[in-house]
Image (cartoon, grey):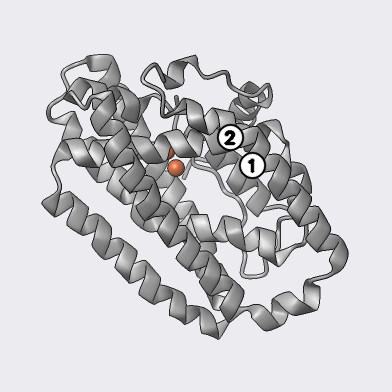
Amino acid sequence: MIVRRVDFGFTPEIDIDFFADDPIRSYLSHAYWMTMPYLEPHLMRTIRAAMNVVRDETLLAEMKLFCSQEGQHYQQHAAVNRILKARNPAFCELEKIEADLEADYHRFTAEKDLGWNLAYAEAFEAMTMTLSCTQMEMRIHDEMTNPIRDLYLWHITEEMEHRTVCFDACRAFGVNWWRRTQIGREARAHYLGYVGRFYAAFLELDAARIATKENEEKRIKREAFQKSFVKQHLLRNLGTWMPWYNPRRVRMPELFEEMRVYYSGRIVTL
Ligand SMILES: [Fe+2]
Ligand SMILES: [Fe+2]
């Protein structure tokens, strides 16, 4: 695992309809990424707190790298989120959702115990790992444009790369399968609830522009994609709820190693 600081070349003019030139598909990704500047710092706070109690040197080194990778992720996504928000004055409405989410995560850190926060982190990491594997296997990036395509591929590659860290931290802290799944259900509902709020807001606040780009062909392609994605993702997702689940045993897509090497070659030094 390494930390890859990459210059994606974001400018105010980047293509925000980066996914199949379809704002409806693109906004679903943007909705996930709106959460990153709040979720990923929460993961980092949680893992840093757990580092005070973990004694295994290998795991401690991985936890440190995990925090560095997530730190890069949320800063890169925050840059794109700022560009996106500048595109439409109505997007200032998104800030209310952002404030709610940020407050939730600070409340979780202050009021919930470390085991709860670790189980939340692992629920997110397991979900993002299975989504990333399915997306990479389906090569959905072939329908994307840069620079957001690169941001997305770099992020999912590192999510797969650090997939064992929160799982191992949960184990080291004594969070058993039962607690992990109980809190995991709550965590995914909380997180996906916010993704839904961001997505609905994007669709509503940008409805006029979306309508100018929408057509029957796009709708049919979008629905076919959603169906095949759900089908391919279902078993992988179910696997994360099983008592024998271990992210170490999940087979990575063929492209994974190639992407690790590719984005390692894109590292910039400041
Ligand atoms: Fe991340
Ligand atoms: Fe992650």
Residue under the image location 26 percent in, 60 percent down: 104
Q: Quick one: 237 or 20, which is closer to the camera?
A: 237
Q: In the rendered view, tell whether residue 189 sits above or below residue 157.
A: below
Quadrant location of ligand 1? top left
Q: In the rendered view, tell whether residue 168 sits above or below residue 32.
A: above
Residue under the image location 58 percent in, 78 percent down: 204
Count residues near mark 2 (Cα–Cα under 10 Å), then give few for <14, some for 14-19, many for 20+: few
Residue under the image location 49 percent in, 41 percent down: 5
Residue under the image location 12 percent in, 27 percent down: 53
Q: Which numbered tag is attached to residue 178?
A: none
Count residues near mark 1 (Cα–Cα under 10 Å), then give few for <14, some for 14-19, many for 20+: few
For badge 2, the amino acid type reads Leu
Percent x, y of residue 101: 33, 63
- How far separated are the C-alphas under marks 1 and 2? 6 Å
Label 1 near ligand 2 (CB < 8 Å): no
- From the viewer's perspective, tell me whether residue 208 is left or right of residue 69: right
Percent x, y of residue 198: 49, 66
The picture quadrant where one finds residue 166 is: top left
Give the tally of numbered discs. Answer: 2
CB of mark 1 within 8 Å of CB of mark 2? yes
The picture quadrant where one finds residue 83 is: bottom right
For badge 1, the amino acid type reads Val
Secondary structure under badge 1?
Answer: helix
Residue furthest toward the right? 217
Q: Is residue 267 visible?
A: no
To which residue does mark 1 refer?
230
- From the viewer's perspective, tell me whether residue 107 is left or right of residue 190: left
Secondary structure under badge 2?
Answer: helix
The picture quadrant where one finds residue 62 is: top left
Quarter of the image where the N terminus is located: top left
To which residue does mark 2 refer?
234
Percent x, y of residue 170: 25, 27
